[in-house]
């Protein structure tokens, strides 16, 4: 009789703690899924630092297999603010015709980030990784071509 009671008590305890754990998990996922807050700044450098933070977040999401985390970070990259018209003017003046290449690479960044969001919503890890790779190459591609040409010009 005593044994039966003990078994029941243990079963109840395990059940309660499992329920509590799964509640906590779903709360965590929900807050990540809604964390699609964008930066307020429309200046190039703050936008860049935010892009970097979101790239790190995607990376972290990959390792801990948190798909909502990957989705929302990729969302923030896809929807990053446009560089303000004043700075855009300076960039155009400095790059001349090459502005087309600058804009093209930015489009690749947007498209790849959107593809990562889509893959994250479908839990497709290998697709996320290959898109992430192209995305990162695009960051570096733009830096290689244009960073030194624009250094100290945008203040
Ligand atoms: C279309 C061009 C372009 C793309 C695409 C781009 N960047 Fe940049 N990035 C720049 C330029 C130009 C600078 C330098 C700005 C300056 O020095 O004032 C810069 C600077 C930075 C910096 C600051 C580095 C430093 O030396 O202080 C970081 C961080 C950064 N980018 C991250 C990223 C990440 C992450 C991505 C991809 C998700 C990315 N960038 C994509 C053009 C680009």
Image (cartoon, helix red, strand yellow):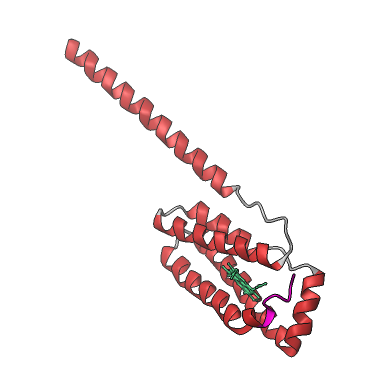
Residue 79 visible in this rendered orientation of the protein: no
Q: Is residue 49 above or below residue 131?
A: above
**Front residue (pair 18, 42):** 42
Viewed as shown, does residue 104 lie left or right of 55?
right
The image quadrant that residue 16 belongs to is: top left
Q: Position of residue 143 (x, y in %)?
A: 59, 78
Residue beneath the point at 68% across and 56% down: 39
What segment carries the magenta color? Answer: 149-155
The image quadrant that residue 81 belongs to is: bottom right
**Front residue (pair 125, 37):** 37
Q: Is residue 2 magenta?
A: no
Quadrant placement of the C terminus:
bottom right
Q: Is residue 95 above or below residue 127?
A: below
Q: Position of residue 65 (x, y in %)?
A: 42, 54
Viewed as shown, does residue 63 lie left or right of 99?
left
Viewed as shown, does residue 61 lie left or right of 6?
right
**Front residue (pair 34, 38):** 38
Q: Position of residue 122 (x, y in %)?
A: 49, 59
Quadrant placement of the N terminus:
top left
């Amino acid at each position: 009789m005593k044994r039966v009671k003990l078994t029941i008590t243990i079963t109840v305890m395990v059940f309660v703690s499992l329920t509590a754990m799964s509640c906590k998990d779903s709360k965590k996922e929900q807050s990540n899924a809604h964390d699609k807050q964008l930066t307020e700044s429309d200046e190039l450098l703050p936008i860049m630092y935010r892009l970097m933070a979101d790239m790190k977040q995607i990376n972290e999401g990959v390792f801990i297999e948190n798909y909502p985390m990957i989705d929302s970070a990729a969302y923030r990259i896809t929807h990053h603010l446009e560089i303000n018209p004043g700075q855009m003017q300076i960039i155009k003046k400095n790059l001349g015709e090459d502005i087309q290449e600058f804009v093209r690479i930015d489009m690749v960044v947007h498209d790849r980030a959107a593809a990562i969001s889509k893959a994250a919503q479908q839990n497709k890890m290998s697709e996320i990784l290959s898109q992430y790779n192209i995305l990162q190459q695009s960051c570096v591609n733009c830096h290689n071509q244009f960073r030194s040409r624009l250094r100290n010009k945008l203040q």
